[in-house]
Image (cartoon, coloured by chain):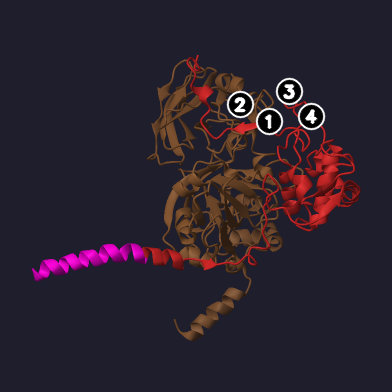
Chain colours: A brown, B red
Amino acid sequence: MTRDRLQHEQAAAAEPCPCQEGMRPSVDLGRRKLLFAGAAATAATGLIGSRAAADTKAPPGAALYDVPEDSTKVPGRGVHEDHGYGTRSQFEKEVRVKADNPSDITSWTFTPLASTIGNLTPSGLHFERHHGGIPVIDPDRHDLFLHGLVDVAKKFSVAELKRLPSVTRKYFIECSGNTLSEWSKPKGKNVQFTHGLLSTSEWTGVPFATLARAVGLKDNAAWVLAEGADAAVMTRSIPIGKMLSDALIVYGQNGEALRPEQGYPLRLVLPGFEGNTHIKWLRRLQVSDRPFMTREETSAYTDLMKDGRAKLYTLAMDAKSVITFPSGEMMLPKPGQYMIQGFAWTGRGRVHAVDISLDKGATWLPARIDNVPEPMCTVRFSFPWHWDGKPVVLQSRCTDETGYVQPTRAELIPLRGENAIYHYNAIQSWAIGADGSVSNVHI
Amino acid sequence: MYTSRLAAAVVAACTLASPALAQERSHEIGTPVSAEDLKPFFSIQPGGIGLPAGSGTVAHGREVYNQRCFYCHGEKLEGNRDMAGPPLAGGRGTLASEKPLKTVESYWPQASTLFDYIWRAMPFDQPGSLTADEVYSLVAYILAEGKIVGQDVRMDAETLSKVVMPNANGFYDGSGPDLRIYRAGADK
């Protein structure tokens, strides 16, 4: 291409003209609405008028393009029109849904489990729980301090941590408040609400053990306080045994840097432990001989039992599973063949088996596990099922490699009462009505 | 003989050198920090470990509370649902009931936690803006309203470390497996 021609094309690209409609992401919605009002513009570019007119706003994470009548009859858009970072299709609209809380600064969002594909959660759909909002942190000005019962207290820059030998592993993170709506009544209408504080990512980071060797641990090191650099200055105490077995100082998520809402630039990942302990925006680790009894491990994230006493440090997430298809608020169009699908996970190792019951737990049949089980990672399961059109209850049950079997409500509630808030892991029941409607029930 | 001696020397050099090298590398990781570098950070532990100098009174605490805290936590520490502010007092004797009221007074096992949390994260709209004296005073006020300390208390590192919370013995270690899940006939 000659310089003249290049300049000519650049000049042409800068001119707004109908011929370019359909080739560029819509950023100027006001102008686009006007254009849609004009039938001439639509006809000139071969748009499907009704569809384009209906979608005047791109879904979050997508850019809006005009939709040609026949995508083989017009050239598609060129490379790099997204400025080098791609977006999802404008036809994909699933989003995190936020909880109905008085303040969005201390609140949470749910992952749309019924519509994520495969085992990993897209980073932009990973559930959130923040206690003081999402901070903006410049990684060049962020250090991780490691001190307390160590030989030499040190700080580590983000750049230095990235230079150290790293590991990359897939782990789920589940908020221990996941499914808290279900203790007394079947309150959650759909699986995003009942189980959506669960997400799985591929995490990349440095083992805590590497940093421990760099500072030297004292003989009486027993607990480590992890502290975040958010406005909540979130703190949790972690047993040193966990820190030295598989704790990671993570900077990568699904092939790129951590998302801000997942702790950019650094977060702690404690495989299988309750989500709150995976301290985001990690800035400090203090080694001690005792736990710190911080607010989030005493006032909150403790499990109140029926006798009025409460459990401290219930950190590992118990085995759990949920059917995502069919699930609450869905509608089966007619009797016939369906593939039941769902997730199973455990904080104590690998998922060993997932079973399905179609008769309220009287009998259980093995589901197919669709990916190779990995420690502290979700698995997908599926189960071919013929619906005869009669009302039925669908349930899934996870057994982990320790032999722990996910309990029924009838087993769990007598043990925990209904006020524990955290660590609800009973078997979930979805009722299919004769009309094909799916609803959350307790049996 | 020459080759085997050389081989032995190489093996010896490697076995000696590798751990030394690894150690040296470990020591090269990170930048040592001084006590001064760590000054911006704090964490208060049970027994008063980490408490700063300073002191406060109930009267001063009431003043600070009415300026900085009541909007979210209520005029009488009863909490304000609309502002996501939990109640701070009341609720004693409710923990085993159907509707437990978890407050500083009824639930929190350690007074050190109250100082630590207020100092690091409160007030919600201006976290970390209170002085140590203001935090001591707020702790005195909240504990006095919960009838855990007297109205005339002078709260400082020493008095705070001696406070015994009403629910101090209400917690137990839940880190192990829930043994009752494994009882015989649990699946019946």
Q: Which residue is mark 1?
A: B170
Q: Are marks 1 and 4 on the same chain?
A: yes
Residue beneath label 3, please? Answer: B98
Q: Are marks 2 and 3 in contact (CB under 8 Å)?
A: no
Separation of disc 3 and disc 4 at Cα? 13 Å
Q: Which chain is mark 1 on?
A: B
Q: Residue at x 43, y 53 (%)?
A: A168
Residue B20 on the magenta segment = yes
Whole-angstrom CA distance, mark 4 to mark 2, is 35 Å
Residue A440, numbered circle: 2
Quadrant for residue B83, please give it: top right
- Number of marks in the rendered image: 4
Tell me, yes or no, if residue A143 can be seen here: yes
Q: Nearer the viewer, mark 3 or mark 1?
A: 1
Q: Mark 3 or mark 4, which has the lower sequence index?
A: 4
Foreground: disc 2 or disc 3? 3
Q: CA–CA distance between discs 2 and 1?
A: 34 Å
- State the SS at label 2: strand
The residue at 44%/17% (across/down) is A363
Secondary structure category for the residue under label 1: loop
Of residues A351 and B155, the one drawn nearer to the viewer in this rendering? B155
- Across and down, in percent, residue B4 comes to 12, 66
The answer for how far apart the CA atoms under marks 2 and 3 are is 23 Å
Q: Which portion, as a residue range, is magenta?
A: B1-21
Reading the image, the residue beneath label 4 is B92
When the figure is inspected, residue A341 is found, relative to residue A356, above or below; the finding is below
